[in-house]
Image (tube, rainbow, N blue to C red):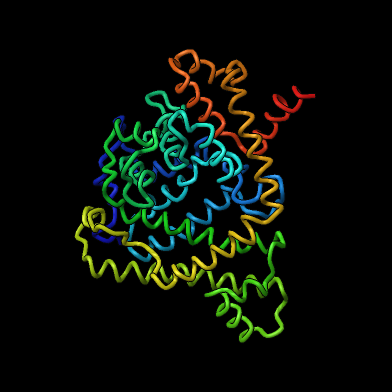
Amino acid sequence: MRAIYGSDPAKTRGRRVAEEESTFRSPYQRDRDRIIHSSAFRRLKHKTQVFVEHEGDYFRTRLTHTLEVAQVARTIAGVLGLDFDLTETLALAHDLGHPPFGHTGEDALSEMMAPHGGFDHNAQALRIVTHLERHYADFDGLNLTWESLEGLAKHNGPVTGDLPWALAECNAAWDLELDTHASAEAQVAAVSDDVAYNHHDLHDGLRAELFSTDDLAELPILSDCFADVDRRYPGLNYYRRRHEALRRFFGILVEDVIAVARRNLAEIDPKDTTDIRMAGRPVIRFSAGLWSDLKVIRRFLFERMYRAPSVVRMRAEVTEVVRDLFPFYLAHPEYLPKQWRKDVEEVESETGLARLVSDYIAGMTDRFALDCHRKFIEEAER
């Protein structure tokens, strides 16, 4: 049963381009399905989470991370009486704008795009769903509902100050009320992202042997998880022991979010979605105590995983890939695919061309970016 503060698909603000309603699916279900069938969603399979996609079959990619976020989001939404479909739409779409090589690729692309308005993966996700996906006869993008676009724009909170150009462009076309918080569904998607990566980065770091189980057992929250496993299953196999401990850690994060959300909702007593947006603070969040513990865990991951020598070496290598490809395509747009070259003909400035090149590179998978670098840069230097 949907709570009164949950988003009601029957009350959606609609789509920019009017469409006939589906016989069998709600507007938010259609949004979710369009995300799943998009080209950008499929490419997440071969995009970096932390480790570059070709480094191992067992590490998370953007796609597997996204699916884990969606699972967490569905669980929390169900407990709180929110709309499953809008929540899942936002969870599935939240990383669509990531370029190849994860945050390393984003940093490099931001550097290249600094003279042309910069690059921001959240804004790029909006650009993808409003412009770059070109499959439908009546519109560019996916023609998502206002609520889905709003959730993508501000799932991390109100957006103020200088806007990324792609977000400013989208907001100018349809006011997303950037100065308020987003729906409860969007807030759930955002915190589910935090739950998922805080859990799975620990798992991937163990698998990569960047730290040990004993190291984790000394961290806040995790120390109690390992102690509980040892009490219940003395002498448990190493791999099962760490899985059981991380499973408990995962559960603690989810349960904390739900408990805090229930307290906040009882305090605010929202009568509709507007009360959530105007609450002046996030309603769906971690408790202060758990968030403090997570900061310790994040510092540990930063030092032992994100700045591990092997990871730093790979970051340096893939940074050069982006730094090389960007000026190459800027100077040689004739090497862009045929459908992109048509857009080049309409570009009227260097910034316009740079943004087109940025769109193209941002859409690349890790392996495709590496292949293009070998083809156009490395072979030319031989």
Residue 42 visible, this angle:
no
Q: Residue 6: x and y, percent?
A: 28, 56
Looking at this view, name the residue that lies furthest to the left. 271
Quick check: 169 above or below 231?
Answer: above
Q: Residue at x 32, y 59 (%)?
A: 282
In this rendered view, identify the residue nearer to me: 33 or 98.
98
Query: In this image, 298 relative to 29: left or right?
Result: right
Quick check: 60 above or below 166?
Answer: below
Looking at this view, name the residue that lies furthest to the right. 382
In this rendered view, identify the residue nearer to me: 186 or 210.
210
| Quarter location, residue 283 | bottom left
Tell me the quarter of the image containing the C terminus. Answer: top right
Quick check: 323 above or below 243?
Answer: above
Tell me the quarter of the image containing the N terminus. Answer: bottom left
Residue 161 visible, this angle:
yes
Query: In this image, 310 relative to 104: left or right?
Result: right
Q: Residue 78: x and y, percent?
A: 38, 62
Query: In this image, 111 relative to 154: left or right?
Result: right
How many marks on residues?
A: 0
Q: Residue at x 47, y 29 (%)?
A: 115
Quick check: 284 above or below 178?
Answer: below
In this rendered view, identify the residue nearer to me: 57 or 106.
106
Q: Residue 7: x and y, percent?
A: 29, 52
Q: Residue at x 66, y 43 (%)?
A: 316
Looking at this view, name the residue that lies furthest to the top. 345
Q: Residue at x 38, y 26 (%)?
A: 139
Q: Residue 20: x and y, percent?
A: 31, 33
